Every structure is written in C-alpha cells, then in structure tokens.
Amino acid sequence: MWGHNPGTSLLAAATKVADARARGAKLIVVDPRRIGFAVKADCWLPVRPGTDAAIALAIAGVMIDQGWFDAEFVRDWTNGPFLVRDEDGTMLRSETLARGDEAGFVSWDERRGGPTTYDIGKHRYADTPGRLAISGEFVVATREGPIRCRPAFELFAARCRAMPPEEVSALSGVDPDAIRETARALWHHRPVAHHTWTGVEQQTNATQTDRAIAILHALTGSIDVPGGNVHYAQIPVNDVSGAEFRKPGQWQKALGRSERPLGPAASGWITSSDLYQAILDKQPYRVRALVGFGANLLLSHTAGGRGAKALRNLEFHVQTDLYLTPTAAFADIVLPIASGWEREGLRVGFGLDQSACEYVQLRPAIVPPRGEARADIDVVFDLAVRLGLGDRFWNGDVEAALSHHFAPSGITPSMLRSAPRRTMRVPLETRYRKYQEQGFGTPLGRLHCKRSASRHWRNFAHRTLIRVRNSHWC
C-alpha cells in the first residue's frame, strides 16, 4: 500500500487487507507515518513526502540487478525491447530500416542476430521473434546509415541504477536495507497487488511518481493474475459521458496539456493551478466563466490566495453546493444542491472484488430536499435543454437516460426500484490475463517503460523516462 491508509478512507478494503494478512500475505506500506497498517507491515518505508518516485526507482534498480523481475513479461508485453537511438533518445522507426518496413518500431532479435519490426496497427511483430534483447547496445543498418541503439528497458534500468539505495536513502529518509528488503519481498512473495491513493498524488511530480510505481509493479508480472491487480468483469452499461460529442481539436485545448502531455490533461482533466493561470494570465488562453459542481477549490486545492484572486476576475461564475462555501461565496449565482439523502443515487459495481462488481443499486432518497435544493443531474439536464442541447440529454428526461444507460445489462430503473434494497446482482465471470487476447489499452497494446517518442516528439524526448526532481508537497 503506497500512500494509502484504507483503515481511515476505505473500510471495506481494510477488511480485505486484514483477511489477506490472516492468510499469510506479506504487507509493504509506504507512508511517512507509522499508523494503521504500517504498524503491522512486514516492510514499512517512512518516505519523505515528495520522494516516492525515487523510492520506486531504487527498488526497481535492486530487482533488475538481482534478476528479480519477469523478463519474459517485459519482452512480450512492454515496449522495453524497442530500440532507442543514442543520438536523440527517440524510438527507432521501422520505416528507417534499409528495407523500409511499414510504420512501426524496431527490436533486436538475439537469436537471429538482427533487427525485427513491430507493427503498430496489428500490435505484433512482423515475424515471430526468437528472443528479444532488453539490454545491450546494437548498431542497426538504416537508410540514414548505421545507427547505434539500446533497448528502452536498458535505458530504464540505467535510470534506476542512477538511484542506488544509499543515495535514495539520503533523499527520502528510508533506510537502504529497507529498500533492498522490499525489493526481495516483491519478487519472492509474488503475485503482488499494489494500491496507491492521494499520498502519491498531492505533489508536483505526481505523474512521474505514478509511472514509476506502475512500472515497478509490472516488473513482477502480477498484472491481471490471481492475487495481483485484476481488471474485474463489469456490469455492461452504455457510456453516457458524452466524449463522442467533443471535437478532437477541443480535446487538445485542455489546460496544461502542452506542458504535461502525460498528465491529467491527456484525459481532459485540468488542475486548479492551470485554471488560475488561464484566468489571471490569459495563458494559454483566457477563461472567462466557470460553472462549478461541488468543488470547493479554495479549501481543497493549493494556492488559496491566488485562487480567490482568480475567482474575483471571472466575468461569470455559477456554483452548486450544499452550503455557501468560501468558493461559492465568490459566485454570481449559487444553486442549492440536494444531499445524498435527498435524492436517488446510482452505483454500478462496488469494486474491491468480483463479487462486489456484480451489484448495481439505485439508492432512494430518504427525505425530500429542503427549500429549492435539487439533484445535480436535474440541474444539468434542465440547463442542457435551455441551452438547446436537449437532443443530447434525452430531452431532459432523466428516466430515459437511466434506461439507456442500463440497456446492455437488461436492467431497468423500475426493476431496481422494486428490488429488495433497490439492489440487483448480475453474475459475472472473472477472466485473467485478458491482455494476452486483446493487448493493453495503449496505442501499442503494450505497457510503456518509455514513452514511444518519434522525432515529432523530439522536444519532449528528454522527459520520456521517469524523472526525479525536487517536488512540492501540496
């Protein structure tokens, strides 16, 4: 558990952890404080806030040097074998080879003693490779002449070796022997399940930190296997996020995307700091209005003073909330929202394990809303109709939207409302190692230990491997 104390934030998960411990599972906790499960952990790493990425790289470095990693998983299901040009740090493209293959990347086949190409569109190698190199240095004949390359995993390993336990100890405050023991435990007590939470998110190096931890977990090969992190089957429902209506050009305009293309903006999310910059500095463009649903930026995000200044500079601000929060106090219009006890609440799947994922619940309102308070969904649907977007919101009919959402499952809202506790179960089957059939959800169908940068990404290439820098704790 990394930056996660389920005993205070997710009691159902805490029960699962305690049960696993009772069955003999080993427990590693990375947390600055010795509280909760850290007290009972086999390995407790009291990390200095903001140095988590360094710890992950140091652990990975020990595992790689000792051979404590799943080399076949790295070869078969990551871009670790893809060759990287020494001259500029970009991936060697198959089009560059003398024979001019289709668009793709290049790996080195150790048994054949030559390059082999990976087809991006088909998510497979052109020829079945013998044994892909994940270390070493190779010179590849190309149209541009001989190019010296190394596998991406070799570069990742070098980055890890540059963070030895002793140096990381001075940076993080974690004893080097604890780092080595954690590496040993991760390998010798597989499969491994890892859970992270806000402890690794509330810092300025959060994206790289999360990448480092994810790659560390991938080294154990414990992805989508019994006892590891499993992608459970989910109740089938229609996607009602509306992502299909967003034009590609608009998606690219997400604040912060140009500076952090691997960060939240890649999925359309923005940070409050980028919002404040757009409002106050008009960079990269001016934000003039804000509609906020429940987010109390001034109390839950950093730079409250700058946030208050930004809210004052908005031309129009609408805020919905249960109370007149400090953020809502700056709004031109405040819409009162019904609490969870004053409206229906839908939950499809409850996570944690496959059994919990099989349940869907339409929780009833316990008491009627007070005053003019309304459910968020009613506010959204009515606004959409008044803005001329009714055709995309079922003409304001929430019941019709729910029916559409549930359609693939065979469940209807009326069935849920008449079911005991308004809860129904849809039996599901857990399947493991699904990536062997469909690949991973990346452009390459593989996990990335290095961003698959081409020359078009040259300005970004120096950031494609995990970096550790001085972080600010938020």
Image (cartoon, rainbow, N blue to C red):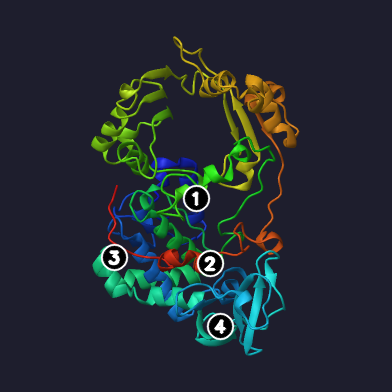
Q: Earlier in the sequence, mark 1 or mark 4?
A: 4
| Mark pair 2, 1: CA separation | 15 Å
Q: Secondary structure at mark 1?
A: helix
Q: Nearer the viewer, mark 1 or mark 4?
A: 4
Q: Is residue 427 above or below residue 394?
A: below
**Kind of residue indicated by mark 1:** Ala
Q: Nearer the viewer, mark 4 or mark 2?
A: 4
Outermost residue toward the front? 144
Q: Pointer 4: what residue?
A: 144
What distance separates the C-alpha of mark 2 from that of mark 3? Answer: 32 Å
- Residue at disc 4, secondary structure: loop
Residue at which label 2 appears: 452
Residue for badge 1: 266
Q: CA distance from mark 4 to mark 2?
A: 20 Å
Q: Is residue 211 above or below residue 146?
A: above
Q: Amino acid at mark 2?
A: Ser
Relative to 108, say whether 467 is above or below.
above
What's the amino acid at mark 4? Glu
Q: Are marks 4 and 3 in contact (CB under 8 Å)?
A: no
Q: CA distance from mark 4 to mark 3?
A: 47 Å
The kind of secondary structure element at disc 3 is loop
CB under 8 Å between discs 1 and 4:
no
Which of 442/163 is in front?
A: 442
